[in-house]
Amino acid sequence: MGSEILPAADSRGTGETAPARGATTTTTTGVSTCDAGASWGARRDFAFERTTGSDDFVEAVNALIQQSDMAPVAVSSHMDPDCVWMVAFSASDAAGATETAHATTFTPMQRHPAGLWTAAPQSTGWLRVVDRASRTVWIPIADVTGSATYGEASCSSLSAVRVSAAIPPSAAALSLMTGAGERTVRELMGAMPSARGWDVRFTFSADISR
């Protein structure tokens, strides 16, 4: 992949509409998804990778995510007013990520015909998890870096999405009802975090949602 930030071929018009999941990936202005801002919601293959001291967290949260119909995270992109492409790895807009309580930051994005990746760490984002008590638990993530490969030429899906992030110490008291009962993030992780927090990595593939 190259290293330059590429502008879109055309700017998005005000009459552009967003395709629903599974819809075609050409906007009403005729701009393809590859050249317009989009959001790809994670499929059920989302999974945390195993890291030292976090097996309980990985097993419990992976199981909750696989049982939910809601994507825990999305890859969202847009072009800012300075014609720089921006990206965020965070729970989708539809899940409330744009609300004040769950605000997400975007970071500059590198683009290539084969895929995309972060040009600098993303400061903040969120994972949305529905626990065994049907409660929505928002897990913050920080210092996020990620990359993804377009699934096909139309850019309607992403494959091989890989993300590295930190769950900050402020999330330690977050509680989830798991298959083994009520547990906090701290209890599931099993070790005190560094000042940065708990390092995590996760992978998934994704489908266009808008």
Image (tube, grey):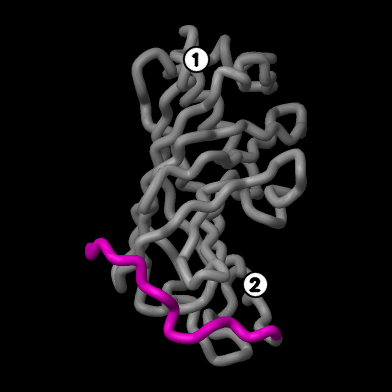
**Res. 189 mark:** 1
Residue 73 drawn at (x, y percent)? 56, 47
Residue 210 drawn at (x, y percent)? 61, 69
Instruction: Please say whether residue 90 is one of the residues in the magenta stretch.
Output: no
Q: In which image quadrant can residue 3 be found?
A: bottom left
Taken as a whole, is the magenta stretch helix, strand or loop?
loop
Q: What are the residue bounds of the magenta stretch?
A: 1-14
Residue 42 in view in this figure: no
Whether residue 39 sits left or right of residue 137 in the image: it is left
Whether residue 157 sits left or right of residue 103 in the image: it is left
Q: In which image quadrant can residue 16 be found?
A: bottom right
Residue 14 in view in this figure: yes
Residue 32 drawn at (x, y percent)? 48, 83
Q: Is residue 174 above or below residue 104?
A: above
Residue linked to disc 2: 20
Q: Quadrant of the N terminus?
A: bottom left
